[in-house]
Amino acid sequence: MKDFVIPWDEKDIGTPAKSGAPVTLSIDGFEVTVPEGTSVMRAAAQAGLDIPKLCATDSVEAFGSCRLCVVEIDGRRGTPSSCTTPVAEGMVVHTQSPKVKKIRRGVMELYISDHPLDCLTCAANGDCELQDMAGAVGLRDVRYAAPEGAGIANHFEARDTSGETNRAWLPKDESNPYFTYDPSKCIVCSRCVRACEEVQGTFALTIQGRGFDSRVSAGAGFDDFLSSDCVSCGACVQACPTATLQEKSVIEKGTPARSVVTTCAYCGVGCSFKAELNGDELIRMVPWKSGAANRGHSCVKGRFAWGYANHKERILNPMIRDRIDEPWREVSWEDAIEFAATRLRGLQEKYGQKSIGVITSSRCTNEETYLVQKLTRAVFGNNNTDTCARVCHSPTGYGLGQTFGTSAGTQDFDSVEQSDIVIVIGANPTDAHPVFGSRLKKRLRAGAKLIVIDPRRTDLVKSPHIEAAHHLALRPGTNVAVVSALAHVIVTEGLYDEAFIRTRCDWDEFQQYAEFVSDPRHAPEAVEELTGVPAAEMRGAARLFANGGNGAIYYGLGVTEHSQGSTTVMGIANLAMLTGNIGRPGVGVNPLRGQNNVQGSCDMGSFPHELPGYRHVKLPEVREIFEKAWGVEIDPEPGLRIPNMLDEAVEGGFKGLYCQGEDILQSDPDTKHVAAGLAAMECVIVHDLFLNETANYAHVFLPGSSFLEKDGTFTNAERRINMVRQVMKPKNGYQDWEVTQLLANAMGGDWTYTHPREIMAEIAATTPSFAGVTYDLIDARGSVQWPCNDDSPDGTPLMHVDGFMRGKGRFMITDYIATEEKTGPRFPLLLTTGRILSQYNVGAQTRRTENSIWHEEDLLEIHPHDAEVRGLNEGDWVRLASRSGETTLRAHLTDRVTPGVVYTTFHHPDTQANVVTTEHSDWATNCPEYKVTAVQVSASNGPSDWQEDYAEQARKARRILPAAE
Amino acid sequence: MAPEKMVMMANQIAGFFHTQPGDDQAAKVADHLNDFWAPKMRGQLIDHVEAGGAGLDPLVIEAIGMVRQPA
Ligand code: SF4
Ligand code: SF4
Ligand code: SF4
Ligand code: FES
């Protein structure tokens, strides 16, 4: 296997890039031209003249503490540090004068005198900058030694020769599951502290004490890493030049020898990583500096939570059973595929061509998703394909399609660096999109303003060095009313951007809209009682957004997962058009996608009404393209969406399902209804890594492969197509696209793909926005943002620059219509749901890693006032009931939620939060209304009957017969 | 699909198009149903209207003539 050759130089050049007018200087006689503001160190490194350094690294601003990087500059006194000295026109720098060489040796000698000399057995051996620098400066001996009898003056010996304990020595902190902190090796360069502040924005680390006593400290004095605010992003580990902060996996397995660049498979940020390996053993995942989405940063999931791929519960052999009350039988791949194909064809013969369908995965690659929807369209002969994006971002597709003409975020993530005012609505990026959250926080610390619209006080509202200008803590379900009220203020106070609207939007539609939204019933004062948002706050927020410069809107599932999800998306698009915030850096409308490939699975035609590239199946000219490519006739009628499939199943008309990489039983609302639908089917095929909850109702289990084991592409929330590269062979024998191909061929598909690049070629040939995409292009450029075609051969970082995809931007009337889900005497509280940093979606992967240390169970957040009237205390078991069902979990009292609102996550199957959610859904797309359920909360002694029955059913359904006779 | 659920979904769609300008709301409701509802679901809705259309928003009933019959 040939490793991917990284086309960019990954060298650490000491200080971050600057932009400014070009400045030319001379370094060791070489002319160098760099932007104004660049450090001498960076300028020298760019000329290939590396100046020794310890406390500088190019992910954080220089600090100038180690004095190893000193240089001489003509006409300046002394020996300035090159990392903190900016370049100047005509400057003449000498990096290797006898004077600076002597200083550097002295500096190194001091460092080494207080450092253990156990290099050979150190985990960072070969990967240690202290070692490298000792070599670079030519350090040959260390003359410092404590005077006889004076006691020890170092940090690395636990006791002296007489057995006296060394008070300056501190034990290793191993509390974090993924990395250790060994103070005896610390050189107090503060790179970790700066990384935690500048890159991650958590401010968990400080330097305590002064001089010889100075120490890196996580949290307050009594804290260790685990109990501190540390979110385990790994930025400090990455920044540390020594073995002080070190991955446990490297300590256990040794330093890696090779690396492959690939893409994180957790969330829609789509961070690029270097998978570092020895042979096919993965040692660590390191964020890739050239990754355009993450720019060298990571979160705990992508950086550390990859151990699930080797988890003992992973299923590696195909299994079948005739009935779901039987135990599983392990069989060969041939037998499993034959069994599945025969059953599916049998069902179609008996119940009709449309009695079976597929669910594509937002975790699998574009190529895999494309094949699964092709399976149903070309082989099953119907359009019954849907994807988990149904339950999260389908309203984005509809809403942005109606207003702008395409279903995608308008910006790249870099854009946030130029935003002046950011609205975050129904999203919690520091938990759900952590690396974007860090990039946003960085911009906010640099002065951009923030408006948070969320029923809950998320971390962004107030955290170290960040404070939202406005937090509109609306009642769940009133998004449309809030968005319209903001627009009301902007229109009635004349704050809209008329020039933009006149040139870029349909003026008549704008006038209709303006008339609609100016109606006094949309005024902040009129909706104050409904939304719970004080009118003054609402007006303040609207004015700030309209007048604040570059305005960007980021939104998440708190917008889409409502009965008016699509309407809110349109309302958001209206706000952006009203204020002229479309088509340049720093602005835009940006859906934050949940799973890693939600964008891609939507692009690839996973929805039952549209072929790849968002083109309706009713259009003959579009069908013709695929009919030619596939050699089949395509059904012009829309197929069934997931909820419709389940409804049809309960009624007996839908009988067979191939479900790749999704766990609809846990992730979809109204669990009992999903279970009833699955139970009514005669052939459920689950294709996954683990026996997930849906598999309890399956007849065929096809083992899946992890993202480390496959080639393909993911498309992140910025429309960026990133490469997923195989770093090890599939433990189950096949990549997921190969399994789909086996099934298709067993049903007469006659597919002959030998590599995912051929699938991408088919996508490019059939889908205009992908026309220019090839694996060669992605390899060469690192990634590419669609549309990528003849008009924009290098891809499209910003959309709608000169005009909207649909021509003129379209203002849509967005009237508030209350959800049917209403509180009342029986269910007086509103439940809203969300996610937390360390866990991912239904938790199937993250629960199988050490991440569980941060989130052992789902908790119900309830305001102390609501708890008190119900006699509930912190940690009590509580019963959470809606008209759909009930479950139990533990209570957490917090004023993050307002009185009347409760909140939980859905990462653990035992919690079964979706037993409680209802079948209500978005009017346009049937995206379920997860974010609003009327509930009651009361004291309880333990798991509900349903939870116990469910656990018993699951236990039985997961039995596997011992390998046969 | 349970009839109440179907009625609710159809009414939600009508609810949105009621708020839209112009005088072709019924046509828009029909377009939406044709574009997003599978034929069998449309058939059920048509049957429901023929059986009296209990619970349906009048706009849905007005639209039903423009809803494509399943083949
Ligand atoms: S892992 Fe991240 S959050 Fe934790 S201390 Fe390091 S930089 Fe800060
Ligand atoms: S832990 Fe590492 S990065 Fe932090 S001060 Fe010590 S040596 Fe520097
Ligand atoms: S932010 Fe998302 S894509 Fe990036 S490492 Fe974390 S989970 Fe992976
Ligand atoms: S690298 Fe410049 S002072 Fe440390």
Image (tube, grey):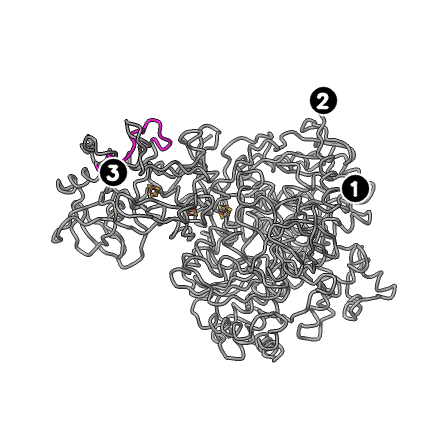
Please identify, in this view, whether the residue under mark 1 or under mark 3 is nearer the observer. Answer: 3
Side of A869 relative to A87 (left or right): right
Side of A433 relative to B43 (left or right): left
Does the beta carbon at disc 3 come under 8 Å from ligand 2? no
- Residue stretch rendered in magenta on the structure: A110-125
**Amino acid carrying mark 2 in the image:** Ala
- Sort mark 1 into few (<14), some (14-19) or many (20+) by Cα contacts within 10 Å: some
**Amino acid carrying mark 3 in the image:** Tyr
Residue highlighted by disc 3:
A111
Question: Quarter of the image holding residue A443?
Answer: bottom left
Report helix, strand or loop for mark 2.
loop
First in sequence, mark 1 or 3: give its number: 3
Residue highlighted by disc 2:
A964
Question: Quarter of the image holding residue A133?
Answer: top left
Front residue of A486/A172: it is A172
Residue A54: image location, x then y, percent: 28, 42
Residue A300 in sight here: yes
